[in-house]
Image (cartoon, grey):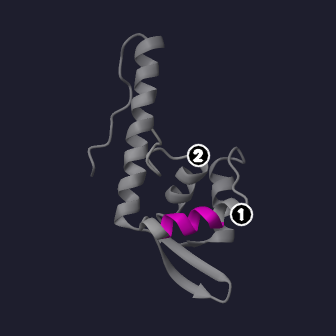
């Protein structure tokens, strides 16, 4: 059975949404992600603009400005929920790892939605 689109996010998807909590244009977004991750994650223009189109079509982001070819975007409430859900999923994985290999404690708290 195929998984639902955006049920889990790639690192690139996660960081695009994370950085769009503040309004940003595509070129600046690529730089923000590179700086935030110390170069560990990079997003090329083809991938970025493809994902921006998909996120906008699903209502996770909204275009806020268009100045010639320069378009700016911002996360919507629906996008915040997707990002929070992904963080909860990742936190659960970290907790499972910690319980199995780290002595049984759950070090990370799942978000409470606030």
Of marks 2 and 1, which one's residue comes earlier in the chain?
2
Q: Residue furthest bottom?
A: 68
Q: Residue furthest front?
A: 1
Residue 76, by quadrant, is: bottom left
Mark nearer the viewer, 2 or 1: 1
Q: Position of residue 12 (x, y in %)?
A: 61, 51
Cβ atoms under marks 2 and 1 closer than 8 Å: no
Other-residue count near label 1 (Cα within 10 Å), few / some / many at <14 / 14–19 / ≥20: few
Is 2 part of what is drawn in magenta? no
> Which residue appears at 41% of the width and 37% of the height?
89
Which of the two residues, 16 or 107, is positioned nearer the viewer here?
Answer: 16
69 on left or right of 62: right
Rendered view: 4 above or below 24:
above
Q: Position of residue 59 (x, y in %)?
A: 41, 68
Badge 2 marks a residue whose secondary structure is: helix
Residue numbers of the magenta segment = 49-56
Residue 8: mark in rendering: none
Quadrant the N terminus occupies: top left
Q: Which residue is mark 2?
A: 11
Residue 46: mark in rendering: 1
Q: Position of residue 25 (x, y in %)?
A: 61, 73
């Amino acid at each position: 059975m195929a998984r639902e689109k955006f049920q889990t996010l790639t690192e690139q998807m996660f960081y695009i949404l994370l950085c769009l909590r503040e309004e940003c244009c595509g070129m600046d977004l690529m730089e923000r992600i590179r700086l935030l991750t110390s170069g560990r994650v990079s997003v090329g223009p083809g991938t970025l603009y493809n994902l921006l189109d998909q996120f906008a079509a699903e209502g996770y982001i909204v275009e806020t400005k268009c100045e010639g070819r320069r378009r700016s975007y911002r996360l919507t409430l629906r996008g915040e929920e997707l990002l929070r859900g992904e963080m909860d999923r990742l936190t659960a994985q970290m907790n499972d790892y910690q319980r199995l290999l780290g002595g049984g404690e759950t070090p990370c708290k799942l978000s409470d939605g606030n």
